[in-house]
Amino acid sequence: MTNHNYRIDRRATKHETWLHFKAGCQSLRRSKLRIAVAVIFTLIMTVLFLAWGLLPPQGVMIQILRMAILFFILPLLTLSGGFCMFVLFGRPFDFMEMSENLGRIGLENKAGQAPIPITKYPHKDNPIVTVHELLTHGATLPEMRDKRLAIESVLDCHVIMFEEKANSKEIVKMCTAPPDKALPNNLYWKDEYLSDKPFELVAGENLLGREIVNLARIPHILLGGASGSGKTVLFKNFIMQCVKKGAEVYIADFKYGLDFPPQWRDKCTFLTQEAELLEILPELESAIKKRAETLYDNQCANIDEYNAKGGDMKRLIFACDEVAELLDKTGLTKDKERIASITAIEGHISSIARLGRASGIHLILATQRPDANVLTGQIKSNIQYRVCGRADKILSGIILDSTDATDLIPNDAQGRFITSTGVVFQAYNLKEDEITL
């Protein structure tokens, strides 16, 4: 090892030890046993200090030695022992083995340092899930997500998600579950799952609990998935919840709504022609400006504040189960009128994607056609909640900007989806004959 690498390793070891100490201190909140150990250690050192100080006087040299022990050695042992104890509290017993395994799959920086576990603890919502806090040593979140399958293999676990720790760029939280724990292959929707929070939609369940999207914070949804992946069922589930929460829903469907039972057509407005879209979409776009003026006049930042003050402003939802049917211009080079119509539709959708959040106007778009020309970058960049079911690499890349859906969703899976943050969940299935709107 060169002197340069030796110095790097020394600094890294000191930093890791300090982080283990901090994690050990924080672990006291989660473990009564550790609190008891810390209290017993403190009592033992206190008794030793008092007992040593109460010894009867001896000769001068013995007295000097006793004072040295009493005021130097015992405090030093107390501090160093306490520090080592908290380092051990924070340090997982297998931390070196895990770090070496992560290094074996290529998660190393140029100095040969792999991410190292700082601490681990049970997840607050699901005790079978373990949260590992990793000092990354320069490994990025995208790199760790890209190597997810290799990490699962080398650590023999399910990786549920990666996320940066709050207020830290150098520590990543990795949630794992034992290899024998898996999501169920089928889950059925129950009305009791409907969230009582203003506009939370429940998509399904992951190993951490319910998969939820709050349209008040993340205003638009983009779904992707191959035929038979369960995409349409999830799409309908979102719309059903929106209707139950009192939203006004517009569904673009060039199949005349035939895939929806009559009760859906009673509760939602179906747009089956381009002319209808070119009438409704400008109205939705105009509603953004009108609502913004109303919110401004009432000194409200968003629709929820306005309604809390006694207003009655419904959320508006524009949904489309196959957005390619709306926006695909392939083969239309000579049909200038049709291209102009599609461009106008695209412009309205883009404006709603950019400006609709505060006004309570939302998009729920879905596609199964892997065509990068269908969704413009401007529309996609303004849709933060993106999920994809079983899909090829092209569609997965369009929806998630990665091949995660191809790599992590089994080829025969139905209703299994992955979010753009890497969380895999099983969506709720709907029994059409039991749905009430």
Image (cartoon, helix red, strand yellow):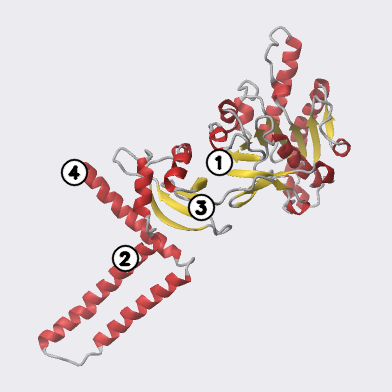
Report whether 392 appears left or right of 315.
left
Give the residue pinned by disc 1: 421
Say what secondary structure mark 4 lies in. Answer: helix
- The CA span between labels 1 and 3 is 21 Å
Query: In percent of the image, x 69 and y 39: which residue is there?
Result: 357
Give the residue pinned by disc 3: 178
Q: Earlier in the sequence, mark 3 or mark 4?
A: 4
Q: Nearer the viewer, residue 228 or 202?
A: 228
Query: In percent of the image, x 32 and y 84: which residue is there?
Result: 47
- The CA span between labels 3 and 2 is 30 Å
Tag 1: amino acid: Thr
**Relative to 124, residue 263 above or below:** above
Say what secondary structure mark 3 lies in. Answer: loop
Could you say which quadrant of the image residue 384 lies in?
top right
> Looking at the image, can residue 201 be seen?
no
Single out the residue that lies furthest toward the top.
334
Give the residue pinned by disc 2: 84
**Which quadrant of the figure contains the C terminus?**
top right
Query: In percent of the image, x 55 and y 41: which residue is there?
Result: 422
Q: Nearer the viewer, mark 3 or mark 2?
A: 3
Tag 3: amino acid: Pro
Say what secondary structure mark 1 lies in. Answer: loop
Give the residue pinned by disc 4: 3
Could you say which quadrant of the image residue 236 lies in?
top right
Q: Nearer the viewer, mark 1 or mark 3?
A: 3
Q: Are marks 2 and 4 in contact (CB under 8 Å)?
A: no
Query: In percent of the image, x 78 and y 49: which residue is there?
Result: 307
Tag 2: amino acid: Cys
